[in-house]
Amino acid sequence: MPTQLVAPFVPLQDPIANVRNGLVGHATWEEFFRDLTGGFRALQTSVAGNLATVLHNTHAARVASFPASDYDAGVQYFETDRGVFYRTDGTDWLYTSGEMRAVLGAEPTDLGADDAGFRLFVTDYRHRVYWTGSAWDWADGDVPGRLAHFAADPGVGWGVLDGTTYDLLTVGATLGTSSFVSPNPGGAYLKDGAYTGSVNAASGTTGTGNTGTGTTGTGTTGTGVTGTGTTSTADASFHVGVAAGADETVPDQFHTHTVPALDIPGLSIPGLSVPSLSVPGLGVGTLEMRHVAAPIYVRL
């Protein structure tokens, strides 16, 4: 037999004896339960009110069936098809947060000043744009037209430079595209320069080399001169003073000095040969620095 629970009888008019357990301020049990019931009702009303401040339906339903003036300021509306939030100021619905995702051509075309800040991710270009209140602008600064090297295909939103014509995303009062004919670099290096609406294809001029003609020098052999010696002959006689005031004759004496002939040898100057110097012609692609090749892509 199940146990029957019986609630104890509490005389509502009896005073609350133990006031140390959080029941201070209530003289009787009746007052305590009345205030407790009122507290639950206030909580219920508050929760219900807060839940009602976030409405949700499609964009078309908000425009057609949920006038902003019908709700207190601060009430929010979530557009289930666009994924964005609006808040009423008591008069108008104002965009607050969220981001819509759509391909080009499926973006909203009914935005106005109250939609300022509306964010859109264009999925087939992988670009984020936002509505200024009167036009579209870039949300992340990742604008089309820039070039970059990639080791592998970066995927959607990029096109390899190979001569293909691409459509680049454009912003303004409406979203659109502009045509871009990509050059085919063919292994050429990028060079800084003024942009005139298109990227120049690879070009260059083939240099013409000139072969220098060498000249062989002719040596000259020097001719030596043999010197002729001269034999000197001493005087036949000379005087020698012997004593003061007196002269004495010395017999003839011959003393000969021979100067030998000097031989100056011939000096030979050898011929000097100037070799021919060849300047080769340099063509496009014939002289190349060490490099790592990687394909170039353009941001669409």
Image (tube, rainbow, N blue to C red):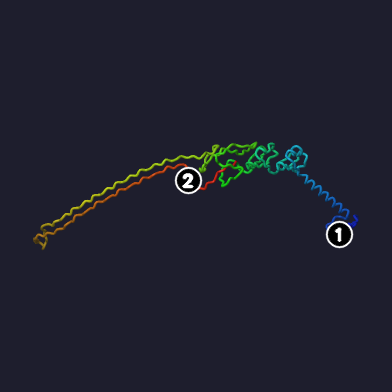
Q: Nearer the viewer, mark 2 or mark 1?
A: 2
Position of 221 with respect to 96 (left or right) is left
Q: Position of residue 151 (x, y in %)?
A: 56, 47
Residue 64 found in image quarter: top right
Residue 247 in sight from this viewpoint: no
Q: Give the residue at x 80% y 46%.
A: 48
Residue 261 higher or lower than 154, as above or below? below
Q: Quick one: label 2, few (<14), some, or many (20+) residues within 10 Å?
A: few
Query: From what the image shows, is residue 164 above or below residue 9?
Result: above
Element marked by disc 2 = loop
Q: Nearer the viewer, residue 263 or 94?
A: 263
Between marks 2 and 1, how big is the CA–CA gap? Answer: 98 Å
Question: Which residue bears the numbered disc 1?
Answer: 18
- Which quarter of the rendered picture does the C terminus lie within? top right
Question: Residue at image x 56%, y 39%?
Answer: 164
Disc 2 designates what residue? 288
Question: In the figure, residue 115 lies in which quadrant?
Answer: top right
